[in-house]
Amino acid sequence: MNIAPADPASPDARALIAELDAALQGITGDSGASSFNPDDVRGPQAVFMIARDGQGRPLGCGALRPLLPGVAELKRMYARPGSSAGAPLLAALEEQAHMLGYREIRLSTRRINARAVDFYRRHGYADAPAWGKYVGSEISVCLGRLLTLRA
């Protein structure tokens, strides 16, 4: 599996994001598209990444954008069903966050999206303070993880 930065407006990125939008619409009743601006994941403190198989086919995507000093927000994380790209993609995004100088990653997802909540919790994410439009939200859960140095 190859995981590398990509333009969020590339055809593969747009296709993966469209799949994510459709999946979230089915699970939560909201695609989440209004919470993502491709320009937010471009620039020196941000990244959009695509995971690909050995033949170059896209398997998943995810992005980081600045949230607070030292804190990145994880956006548009998606792995195609059956691709096994989720954990490697999350690890690659965490490594990118570390390389960008972040000490923590946070994210928000809908509580009803139990599969996503369980995935993040299995990977060390715990309840985190809500920010912005998520403050006081009954439908969202905010999670975060401190980044540790890897040997």
Image: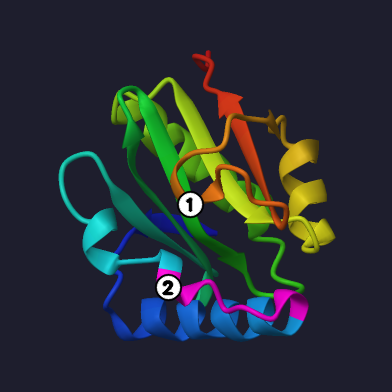
User: What label sits on residue 34 in the rendered view?
Assistant: 2
- Rendered position, 128 above or below 51: above
In the rendered image, residue 31 lying in the magenta stretch gets the answer yes
Could you say which quadrant of the image residue 115 lies in? bottom right
Give the residues drawn in magenta, as a range. Answer: 27-34
Q: Amino acid at mark 1?
A: Lys
In the rendered image, residue 112 lying in the magenta stretch gets the answer no
Does dot 2 land on a helix, a strand or a loop?
helix
Of labels 1 and 2, the one closer to you: 1
Q: Nearer the viewer, residue 11 or 109?
A: 109
User: What label sits on residue 133 in the rendered view?
Assistant: 1
Residue 57 shows in this picture: no
Mark 1 or 2, nearer chain start: 2
Q: Position of residue 18 (x, y in %)?
A: 50, 85
Q: Amino acid at mark 2?
A: Ser
Q: Position of residue 114 (x, y in %)?
A: 83, 58
Q: In the current view of this chain or complex, which residue is farthest to the left? A: 43
Q: Position of residue 132 (x, y in %)?
A: 44, 45
Name the side, left or right, on which 47 lies relative to 85: left
User: What label sits on residue 14 in the rendered view?
Assistant: none
Q: Residues within 10 Å of mark 1 (few under 14, many from 20)?
A: few
Q: Nearer the viewer, residue 76 or 59?
A: 76
Residue 127 shows in this picture: yes
